[in-house]
Amino acid sequence: MLREPLLIMTWLWFQQPVMCGYDSGKVNLWAAQLRRNLTIPHRLACVTDHPQGIDSSIEIIRMQRDFIDVRNDRWREAQKRPQCYRRLALFAPDAEQRFGAKRFVSMDLDMIATANLDPLFDHDDDFRILKGSAHGRPFNGSMVQMNAGARPKAFSEFTVEGAIESRRKYVGSDQAWLCHCLSRKERTWSYQDGVQYYRASHRLMDRIPKGLRLLFFPGAPKPWQLPSWTLLGSMISEAEAA
């Protein structure tokens, strides 16, 4: 189905107080895992103003400035909650020019890839997003795949007032807004596709669950914060050495 290399990008920025240990090394780890688990033609990129230490094989896309100064008192940085409204640039009418691709994936750094990811991305849907991690959370912003220009109202109709209102009902910053403004009929990835969220029970795993492809870590802990002797910690170490 794919006609040109799929752009898969992640994001790196720093906020105060510093949270979760995100840095260039985590970007390199993210890329190593994707290279090992993708066979479809693809490009890897990081959207950032801090390219130092990022491997030269990873494209650098300048950080998007739209909504970068938006702060939501219902989701405060002081409580180490991420302000991610800048990622709404994905939905900008000129997204193709901004990111250099007609079709792209945005994926968070806090994940572990455990198997081939081709089936997740090789489809013709114009938009797909992760299913929410709990009841009452229709979507999760950790991964989005879309055609440039799809769902433009997520960008064009965004306001600070809308951000505050969406947070009254949903968790997150940009994620809450997407839950507020997108249709519940959107296609999603879920457990059936091999995408899961980390839970305490994963600490007890002695093998990778059957069918698992991607494991995301919304909230705490992050994969690099797990004890090195657990299965997941070992997987991180293997990816770093790849």
Image (cartoon, rainbow, N blue to C red):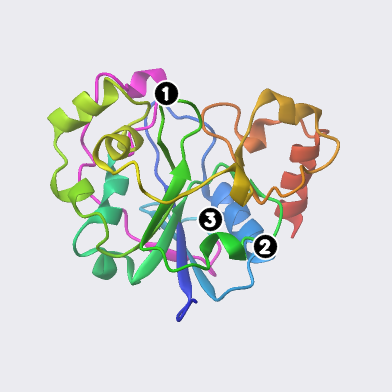
Which numbered mark, 1 or 2, is in the foreground of this view? Answer: 2
Quarter residue 124 falls in: bottom left
Secondary structure beneath dot 2 equals helix
Any mark on residue 80, and which? Answer: 1
Can residue 86 be seen here? The reply is yes
Residue type at mark 3 is: Gly
Q: Position of residue 115 (x, y in %)?
A: 71, 56
Q: Residue at x 56, y 59 (%)?
A: 120
Q: Residue at the front extreme? A: 185
Q: Is residue 122 above or below residue 78?
A: below
Q: Which residue is drawn at 64% across and 49% down?
A: 194
Sequence order check, earlier mark of 3 and 1:
3
For the C terminus, the image quarter is bottom right
Give the residues in magenta: 55-84
Residue type at mark 1 is: Lys
Q: In this view, does 158 lie above or below 57?
A: above
Any mark on residue 37, and which? Answer: 2
Instruction: Using the image as rendered, state which of residue 69 and residue 92 is in the foreground.
Output: 92
Instruction: Using the image as rendered, state which of residue 19 and residue 181 is in the foreground.
Output: 181
Q: Is 149 in the magenta?
A: no
Secondary structure beneath dot 3 equals loop
